[in-house]
Image (cartoon, grey):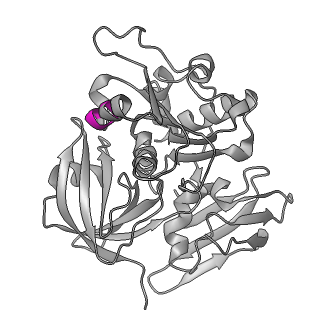
Protein backbone atom coordinates (compact mmCIF):
# COMPACT_ATOMS: atom_id res chain seq x y z
CA UNK A 1 0.00 0.00 0.00
CA UNK A 2 1.31 3.43 -0.84
CA UNK A 3 1.65 5.78 2.07
CA UNK A 4 2.14 9.48 2.54
CA UNK A 5 3.77 8.85 5.91
CA UNK A 6 7.52 9.18 6.06
CA UNK A 7 10.25 9.13 8.65
CA UNK A 8 11.76 12.39 9.86
CA UNK A 9 14.82 12.60 12.07
CA UNK A 10 15.21 15.00 14.95
CA UNK A 11 18.35 17.04 14.30
CA UNK A 12 18.04 19.80 16.86
CA UNK A 13 15.91 21.60 19.40
CA UNK A 14 15.65 24.89 21.27
CA UNK A 15 13.62 25.72 24.35
CA UNK A 16 11.41 28.72 23.62
CA UNK A 17 9.74 28.97 27.04
CA UNK A 18 9.33 26.75 30.13
CA UNK A 19 6.78 24.66 28.27
CA UNK A 20 7.44 25.19 24.56
CA UNK A 21 10.22 23.80 22.43
CA UNK A 22 11.20 24.24 18.80
CA UNK A 23 12.17 20.96 17.19
CA UNK A 24 14.15 20.77 13.97
CA UNK A 25 13.46 17.79 11.74
CA UNK A 26 15.32 16.48 8.72
CA UNK A 27 12.81 15.39 6.11
CA UNK A 28 14.11 13.46 3.12
CA UNK A 29 13.15 15.05 -0.19
CA UNK A 30 11.36 18.06 1.28
CA UNK A 31 11.54 20.90 -1.24
CA UNK A 32 10.31 23.84 0.80
CA UNK A 33 6.68 24.32 1.76
CA UNK A 34 4.05 27.03 1.93
CA UNK A 35 4.14 29.35 4.93
CA UNK A 36 1.29 28.41 7.26
CA UNK A 37 1.15 24.69 6.49
CA UNK A 38 1.28 21.97 9.12
CA UNK A 39 2.53 18.44 9.51
CA UNK A 40 0.85 15.52 11.21
CA UNK A 41 2.93 13.46 13.61
CA UNK A 42 2.03 9.84 14.35
CA UNK A 43 3.32 8.14 17.47
CA UNK A 44 2.90 4.40 17.83
CA UNK A 45 3.15 2.63 21.19
CA UNK A 46 4.62 -0.84 21.61
CA UNK A 47 1.12 -2.30 21.74
CA UNK A 48 0.21 -0.71 18.41
CA UNK A 49 -1.85 2.17 19.81
CA UNK A 50 -1.35 5.26 17.67
CA UNK A 51 -1.93 8.95 18.27
CA UNK A 52 -1.86 11.54 15.49
CA UNK A 53 -1.46 15.26 16.17
CA UNK A 54 -0.99 18.24 13.88
CA UNK A 55 1.70 20.85 14.38
CA UNK A 56 2.16 24.04 12.42
CA UNK A 57 5.48 24.50 10.69
CA UNK A 58 7.33 27.47 12.19
CA UNK A 59 10.22 27.68 9.75
CA UNK A 60 10.23 28.88 6.16
CA UNK A 61 12.12 27.95 3.05
CA UNK A 62 14.47 25.28 4.35
CA UNK A 63 14.97 22.47 1.87
CA UNK A 64 15.30 19.11 3.56
CA UNK A 65 14.48 20.51 7.00
CA UNK A 66 11.63 22.07 8.88
CA UNK A 67 10.95 23.27 12.40
CA UNK A 68 7.86 22.93 14.53
CA UNK A 69 7.25 24.62 17.87
CA UNK A 70 5.33 22.49 20.34
CA UNK A 71 3.69 23.88 23.47
CA UNK A 72 3.19 21.26 26.13
CA UNK A 73 -0.39 20.58 27.13
CA UNK A 74 -0.35 19.47 30.80
CA UNK A 75 -2.64 16.49 30.18
CA UNK A 76 -1.59 15.94 26.58
CA UNK A 77 -0.92 12.52 25.11
CA UNK A 78 1.71 13.62 22.64
CA UNK A 79 3.03 17.11 23.39
CA UNK A 80 4.75 16.30 26.74
CA UNK A 81 6.71 13.57 24.97
CA UNK A 82 7.72 15.88 22.13
CA UNK A 83 8.74 18.68 24.50
CA UNK A 84 10.39 16.64 27.28
CA UNK A 85 11.64 13.35 25.88
CA UNK A 86 12.49 13.73 22.23
CA UNK A 87 16.25 13.71 21.60
CA UNK A 88 18.49 14.40 18.65
CA UNK A 89 18.68 11.27 16.51
CA UNK A 90 15.14 10.14 17.36
CA UNK A 91 12.82 9.40 14.47
CA UNK A 92 9.21 10.46 14.02
CA UNK A 93 6.56 9.46 11.51
CA UNK A 94 5.22 12.52 9.74
CA UNK A 95 2.70 13.38 7.02
CA UNK A 96 2.97 16.65 5.12
CA UNK A 97 3.52 19.58 5.16
CA UNK A 98 -0.11 19.87 4.03
CA UNK A 99 -2.89 22.42 3.73
CA UNK A 100 -3.09 25.00 0.95
CA UNK A 101 -5.59 27.42 2.47
CA UNK A 102 -4.19 28.89 5.68
CA UNK A 103 -1.08 29.92 3.77
CA UNK A 104 0.63 33.11 2.66
CA UNK A 105 2.22 33.23 -0.77
CA UNK A 106 4.96 35.76 -1.66
CA UNK A 107 3.00 36.58 -4.85
CA UNK A 108 0.29 38.31 -2.76
CA UNK A 109 0.36 42.11 -2.92
CA UNK A 110 -2.07 42.97 -0.08
CA UNK A 111 -0.88 44.08 3.33
CA UNK A 112 -1.00 41.21 5.80
CA UNK A 113 -2.48 41.31 9.27
CA UNK A 114 -1.48 38.39 11.48
CA UNK A 115 -3.42 37.82 14.71
CA UNK A 116 -2.13 35.13 17.04
CA UNK A 117 -3.28 33.94 20.44
CA UNK A 118 -0.64 32.10 22.49
CA UNK A 119 1.06 29.39 20.48
CA UNK A 120 -1.21 30.37 17.58
CA UNK A 121 1.73 32.55 16.62
CA UNK A 122 3.62 29.53 15.25
CA UNK A 123 2.26 29.39 11.66
CA UNK A 124 2.24 33.20 11.61
CA UNK A 125 5.97 33.12 12.37
CA UNK A 126 6.46 30.93 9.31
CA UNK A 127 4.69 33.61 7.26
CA UNK A 128 6.86 36.35 8.79
CA UNK A 129 10.00 34.38 8.01
CA UNK A 130 8.88 33.66 4.44
CA UNK A 131 8.04 37.33 3.97
CA UNK A 132 11.38 38.47 5.36
CA UNK A 133 13.22 36.06 3.06
CA UNK A 134 11.27 37.23 0.01
CA UNK A 135 11.38 40.38 -2.06
CA UNK A 136 7.73 40.98 -1.20
CA UNK A 137 7.45 44.56 0.05
CA UNK A 138 3.87 44.42 1.42
CA UNK A 139 3.70 45.54 5.05
CA UNK A 140 3.09 42.83 7.65
CA UNK A 141 1.60 43.51 11.04
CA UNK A 142 1.43 40.99 13.88
CA UNK A 143 -0.89 41.28 16.84
CA UNK A 144 0.28 38.77 19.42
CA UNK A 145 -2.05 38.15 22.35
CA UNK A 146 -0.40 36.24 25.18
CA UNK A 147 -0.88 35.54 28.84
CA UNK A 148 2.48 36.71 30.15
CA UNK A 149 6.02 37.56 29.03
CA UNK A 150 7.06 34.04 30.08
CA UNK A 151 4.98 32.52 27.30
CA UNK A 152 6.44 34.69 24.52
CA UNK A 153 7.71 32.59 21.62
CA UNK A 154 10.49 33.76 19.27
CA UNK A 155 11.33 36.61 21.68
CA UNK A 156 14.77 37.51 20.33
CA UNK A 157 13.89 37.12 16.67
CA UNK A 158 10.76 39.26 16.94
CA UNK A 159 12.69 41.89 18.87
CA UNK A 160 15.41 41.94 16.22
CA UNK A 161 12.93 42.10 13.34
CA UNK A 162 11.06 44.97 15.00
CA UNK A 163 14.36 46.86 15.15
CA UNK A 164 15.69 45.98 11.73
CA UNK A 165 12.77 45.33 9.40
CA UNK A 166 10.83 48.21 7.92
CA UNK A 167 8.12 45.85 6.65
CA UNK A 168 7.06 44.27 9.96
CA UNK A 169 5.25 45.82 12.94
CA UNK A 170 4.54 43.82 16.09
CA UNK A 171 1.98 44.64 18.78
CA UNK A 172 1.73 42.66 21.99
CA UNK A 173 -1.37 42.35 24.16
CA UNK A 174 -0.74 40.81 27.59
CA UNK A 175 -3.82 39.30 29.21
CA UNK A 176 -2.60 38.21 32.66
CA UNK A 177 0.77 39.78 33.40
CA UNK A 178 2.98 42.25 31.56
CA UNK A 179 6.71 42.85 31.32
CA UNK A 180 8.04 45.36 33.86
CA UNK A 181 7.35 48.93 32.88
CA UNK A 182 4.74 47.94 30.27
CA UNK A 183 2.49 50.94 29.55
CA UNK A 184 -0.80 49.01 29.92
CA UNK A 185 -2.25 46.77 32.61
CA UNK A 186 -2.92 43.13 31.71
CA UNK A 187 -6.48 42.77 30.42
CA UNK A 188 -8.67 40.47 28.38
CA UNK A 189 -8.47 41.11 24.68
CA UNK A 190 -11.46 43.17 23.56
CA UNK A 191 -12.72 44.26 20.16
CA UNK A 192 -11.55 47.84 20.82
CA UNK A 193 -8.04 46.74 21.80
CA UNK A 194 -7.84 44.55 18.72
CA UNK A 195 -9.20 47.01 16.19
CA UNK A 196 -6.87 49.78 17.42
CA UNK A 197 -3.81 47.64 16.65
CA UNK A 198 -4.47 46.18 13.20
CA UNK A 199 -4.58 47.43 9.61
CA UNK A 200 -7.95 49.09 8.97
CA UNK A 201 -10.46 47.29 6.74
CA UNK A 202 -10.05 50.03 4.09
CA UNK A 203 -6.50 48.85 3.43
CA UNK A 204 -7.85 45.42 2.44
CA UNK A 205 -5.42 43.34 4.44
CA UNK A 206 -5.22 39.58 4.11
CA UNK A 207 -5.98 38.51 7.68
CA UNK A 208 -4.73 35.31 9.29
CA UNK A 209 -6.06 34.39 12.74
CA UNK A 210 -4.69 31.46 14.73
CA UNK A 211 -5.22 30.34 18.30
CA UNK A 212 -7.62 28.52 20.58
CA UNK A 213 -11.10 28.05 19.16
CA UNK A 214 -12.67 30.68 21.41
CA UNK A 215 -9.97 33.19 20.46
CA UNK A 216 -10.35 32.60 16.75
CA UNK A 217 -14.14 32.77 16.82
CA UNK A 218 -14.27 35.96 18.88
CA UNK A 219 -11.65 37.68 16.73
CA UNK A 220 -13.25 36.61 13.45
CA UNK A 221 -16.65 37.86 14.64
CA UNK A 222 -15.20 41.24 15.66
CA UNK A 223 -13.46 41.60 12.32
CA UNK A 224 -16.60 40.89 10.31
CA UNK A 225 -18.63 43.28 12.48
CA UNK A 226 -15.99 45.96 11.92
CA UNK A 227 -16.37 45.62 8.15
CA UNK A 228 -13.54 43.27 7.19
CA UNK A 229 -14.75 41.02 4.39
CA UNK A 230 -15.22 37.39 5.41
CA UNK A 231 -13.27 36.35 2.32
CA UNK A 232 -10.18 38.20 3.54
CA UNK A 233 -10.09 36.33 6.87
CA UNK A 234 -8.46 32.92 7.14
CA UNK A 235 -8.57 31.03 10.41
CA UNK A 236 -6.80 28.16 12.09
CA UNK A 237 -8.36 26.89 15.30
CA UNK A 238 -6.61 24.73 17.85
CA UNK A 239 -9.00 22.39 19.52
CA UNK A 240 -10.10 18.73 19.43
CA UNK A 241 -7.39 16.16 19.89
CA UNK A 242 -6.90 15.84 16.16
CA UNK A 243 -6.65 19.56 15.61
CA UNK A 244 -3.71 21.73 14.81
CA UNK A 245 -1.54 22.43 17.83
CA UNK B 1 -12.75 18.59 28.08
CA UNK B 2 -16.02 17.07 29.29
CA UNK B 3 -18.95 19.20 30.29
CA UNK B 4 -18.41 18.11 33.89
CA UNK B 5 -14.99 19.75 33.77
CA UNK B 6 -16.58 22.96 32.63
CA UNK B 7 -18.56 23.11 35.83
CA UNK B 8 -15.56 22.32 37.97
CA UNK B 9 -13.17 24.92 36.60
CA UNK B 10 -13.55 28.39 35.14
CA UNK B 11 -12.70 28.27 31.46
CA UNK B 12 -9.19 29.70 31.21
CA UNK B 13 -9.77 31.48 27.92
CA UNK B 14 -12.28 33.75 29.53
CA UNK B 15 -9.48 35.53 31.34
CA UNK B 16 -7.79 36.19 28.04
CA UNK B 17 -10.50 37.29 25.67
CA UNK B 18 -13.81 39.08 25.87
CA UNK B 19 -15.71 36.30 24.14
CA UNK B 20 -19.27 35.10 24.13
CA UNK B 21 -20.55 31.56 24.74
CA UNK B 22 -18.59 28.75 23.15
CA UNK B 23 -19.68 26.24 20.57
CA UNK B 24 -20.85 23.18 22.52
CA UNK B 25 -18.91 20.73 20.35
CA UNK B 26 -15.46 21.96 19.41
CA UNK B 27 -14.59 22.06 15.74
CA UNK B 28 -11.48 23.07 13.86
CA UNK B 29 -10.94 24.39 10.35
CA UNK B 30 -10.88 22.58 7.02
CA UNK B 31 -7.12 22.60 7.20
CA UNK B 32 -7.25 19.97 9.92
CA UNK B 33 -8.47 17.40 7.39
CA UNK B 34 -5.58 18.11 5.02
CA UNK B 35 -3.33 15.31 6.23
CA UNK B 36 -5.97 12.60 6.08
CA UNK B 37 -7.23 13.75 2.67
CA UNK B 38 -3.66 13.86 1.33
CA UNK B 39 -3.68 10.07 1.64
CA UNK B 40 -6.49 9.91 -0.91
CA UNK B 41 -6.18 12.93 -3.23
CA UNK B 42 -3.12 13.78 -5.26
CA UNK B 43 -4.19 17.43 -5.31
CA UNK B 44 -4.52 19.49 -2.14
CA UNK B 45 -8.24 20.17 -1.99
CA UNK B 46 -8.13 22.34 1.14
CA UNK B 47 -7.74 25.44 -1.05
CA UNK B 48 -10.47 24.25 -3.44
CA UNK B 49 -13.91 25.84 -3.54
CA UNK B 50 -16.73 23.48 -2.74
CA UNK B 51 -20.48 23.83 -3.11
CA UNK B 52 -22.63 22.62 -0.21
CA UNK B 53 -25.39 20.37 -1.52
CA UNK B 54 -27.60 21.32 1.41
CA UNK B 55 -27.62 25.14 1.26
CA UNK B 56 -25.74 25.96 -1.93
CA UNK B 57 -22.99 27.98 -0.23
CA UNK B 58 -19.74 28.01 -2.18
CA UNK B 59 -16.72 28.30 0.08
CA UNK B 60 -13.12 27.29 0.35
CA UNK B 61 -12.83 23.81 1.80
CA UNK B 62 -10.43 25.29 4.35
CA UNK B 63 -13.25 27.44 5.71
CA UNK B 64 -15.44 24.45 6.57
CA UNK B 65 -15.88 23.04 10.08
CA UNK B 66 -14.01 19.87 10.89
CA UNK B 67 -14.95 17.56 13.74
CA UNK B 68 -12.19 15.14 14.62
CA UNK B 69 -13.28 13.85 18.03
CA UNK B 70 -15.11 10.97 16.39
CA UNK B 71 -14.32 7.57 14.91
CA UNK B 72 -13.71 9.39 11.65
CA UNK B 73 -13.50 12.91 10.33
CA UNK B 74 -16.70 14.86 9.71
CA UNK B 75 -16.60 18.08 7.67
CA UNK B 76 -19.59 20.40 7.88
CA UNK B 77 -20.68 23.53 6.03
CA UNK B 78 -19.98 26.65 8.10
CA UNK B 79 -23.21 28.24 6.82
CA UNK B 80 -25.80 25.49 7.37
CA UNK B 81 -23.86 22.84 9.35
CA UNK B 82 -24.83 20.24 6.75
CA UNK B 83 -22.40 17.34 6.38
CA UNK B 84 -20.06 17.85 3.40
CA UNK B 85 -17.70 14.95 3.84
CA UNK B 86 -17.12 11.95 6.07
CA UNK B 87 -13.95 9.93 6.16
CA UNK B 88 -13.37 6.78 8.17
CA UNK B 89 -10.17 4.77 8.04
CA UNK B 90 -9.80 1.16 9.04
CA UNK B 91 -6.48 -0.69 9.01
CA UNK B 92 -7.20 -1.86 5.48
CA UNK B 93 -9.72 0.58 3.94
CA UNK B 94 -10.87 4.17 3.58
CA UNK B 95 -14.59 4.95 3.63
CA UNK B 96 -15.23 8.30 1.99
CA UNK B 97 -18.64 9.98 1.70
CA UNK B 98 -18.60 13.11 -0.46
CA UNK B 99 -22.35 13.27 -1.00
CA UNK B 100 -22.69 16.65 0.72
CA UNK B 101 -20.51 18.35 -1.88
CA UNK B 102 -22.12 18.97 -5.24
CA UNK B 103 -18.81 20.02 -6.77
CA UNK B 104 -15.23 21.05 -6.07
CA UNK B 105 -13.48 23.76 -8.04
CA UNK B 106 -9.72 23.27 -7.92
CA UNK B 107 -7.07 25.79 -8.92
CA UNK B 108 -4.68 24.09 -11.34
CA UNK B 109 -1.97 26.68 -10.71
CA UNK B 110 -1.61 26.04 -6.98
Query: Which residue lies at the image location 77% right of the left edge and 68% below the top edge?
Result: B100
- Taking the image as shown, residue B69 lies to the left or right of residue A92, namely right
- Taking the image as shown, residue B2 lies to the left or right of residue A181, namely right
Tell me where residue B78 appears, x and y as whole percent. 72, 50
Nearer to me, A49 or A163: A163
Query: Which residue lies at the image location 42% right of the left edge and 69% below the top edge?
Result: A96
Tell me where residue A145 appears, x and y as whole percent. 45, 28
Nearer to me, A171 or A71: A171
**A175 w.r.t. A3: above or below:** above
Image quadrant where residue B24 sits: top right
Part of the protein shown in magenta? A155-159
**A21 w.r.t. A9: above or below:** above
- Count of numbered labels shown in the rendering: 0
Tell me where residue A204 appears, x and y as whole percent. 70, 38
Residue farthest to the left, as pictured: A88
Q: Is residue A77 something one can see in this rendering?
A: no
Residue farthest to the bottom, as pictured: A1
Image quadrant where residue B91 sits: bottom left
Query: Which residue lies at the image location 68% right of the left edge and 75% below the top edge?
Result: B97
**A57 w.r.t. B18: above or below:** below
Q: Main secondary structure of the magenta part?
A: helix
The quarter of the image holding the C terminus of chain B is bottom right
Magenta stretch contains residue A51: no
**A245 w.r.t. A215: above or below:** below
Q: Is residue A104 something one can see in this rendering?
A: yes
Amino acid sequence: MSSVWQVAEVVGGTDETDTARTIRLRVEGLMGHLAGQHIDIRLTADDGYTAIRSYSVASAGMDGHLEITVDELPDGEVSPYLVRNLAVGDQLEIRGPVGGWFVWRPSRVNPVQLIGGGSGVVPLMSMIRAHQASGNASPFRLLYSLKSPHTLLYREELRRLERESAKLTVDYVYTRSTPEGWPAKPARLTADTLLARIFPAEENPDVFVCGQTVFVEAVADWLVMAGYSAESIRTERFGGTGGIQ
Amino acid sequence: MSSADNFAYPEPEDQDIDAGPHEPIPSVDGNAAAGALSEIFRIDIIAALGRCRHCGAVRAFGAAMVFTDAPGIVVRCRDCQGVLLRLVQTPTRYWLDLSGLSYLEIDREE
